[in-house]
Amino acid sequence: MTQPVTLGGRPNMPPPGAPAEELLVARLRSQARRLFWPAALLIATAGATGYFYDNLPAPFENWMLLAAAGIVVLLLVVMPFLFWISRTFTITTRRVIVRDGLGSRRRRELSHMRGYSISIRRGPLQRMWGAGTITLSNGADEPVRLVNVPMASLVHEVLADQVEVNQILAHRDAQTASRGY
């Protein structure tokens, strides 16, 4: 999503004292490459179930095969997918929001206006896929980790830009308030 820009290339800013509208910049999940093995297991389970159906030795029955395949799929395919899909990272023009959890939701927010340090860690596989783990720390609270974010260098750049713009707006509004305008 892009913001309208002025001739100088900077985003349009609200007038002094007016609240800035909160816009969605990006909504992300960690990279789906961790779902490779569950997907391969799903294919293997489906193939093995199809092969052994009606070909089982005497003491076993087809319902036992289907029950075992169902348990394998539920525990080793569906659960990793649910854990992956339940964690989202949202970047707006005012804050970063991390939501995770299946049964009970946990939500952490970090305001751009307060400022924070941004560090990025990339392992060899993450570098190969363009991903990385971004850690946001404001020095007071527990650091917020965006684990395995796709296009990590672009997300790092966007976060740095949002912090800069929000601190400029906060400084400008503080200057305007102190002058009494």
Image (cartoon, helix red, strand yellow):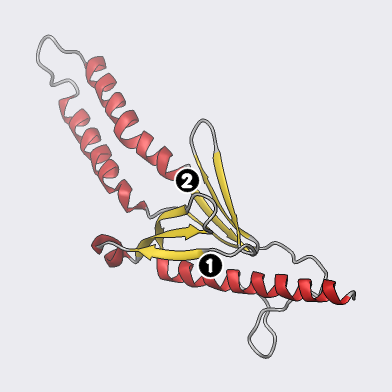
User: Foreground: 135 or 176?
Assistant: 176
Pointer 2 local density, CA inside 10 Å: few below 14, some 14–19, many at least 20: many
Q: Quadrant of the N terminus?
A: bottom right
Pointer 1 local density, CA inside 10 Å: few below 14, some 14–19, many at least 20: many
User: Foreground: 163 or 54?
Assistant: 163
Identify residue type, mark 2. Arg
Q: Vertical placement of 105 versus 27: above or below? A: above
**Total of numbered circles in the picture?**
2
First-in-chain label (1 vs 2): 2
Q: Is 63 situated left or right of 28 in this image? A: left
Question: Where in the figure is residue 58, as x and y percent of width and height?
Answer: 10, 11
Q: Name which quarter of the figure residue 161 lies in.
A: bottom right
The residue under label 1 is 159
User: Foreground: 78 or 83?
Assistant: 83
The reply to whether discs 1 and 2 touch (Cβ–Cβ < 8 Å) is no
For numbered disc 2, what is the local secondary structure?
Answer: loop
Question: Where in the figure is residue 82, as x and y percent of width and height?
Answer: 42, 38
Q: Which mark is residue 70?
A: none
Q: Which residue is drawn at the image coordinates 60% and 74% (left, top)? A: 164
| Residue most extreme to the bottom | 7
Identify residue type, mark 1. Leu
From where the camera sits, is residue 147 visible? yes
* Real-space CA distance between mark 1 and mark 2, rounded to the nearest whole angstrom: 19 Å
Question: Where in the figure is residue 171, as x and y percent of width and height?
Answer: 71, 73
From where the camera sits, is residue 151 visible? no
For numbered disc 1, what is the local secondary structure?
Answer: helix
Q: Name which quarter of the figure residue 179 lies in.
A: bottom right
The residue under label 2 is 87
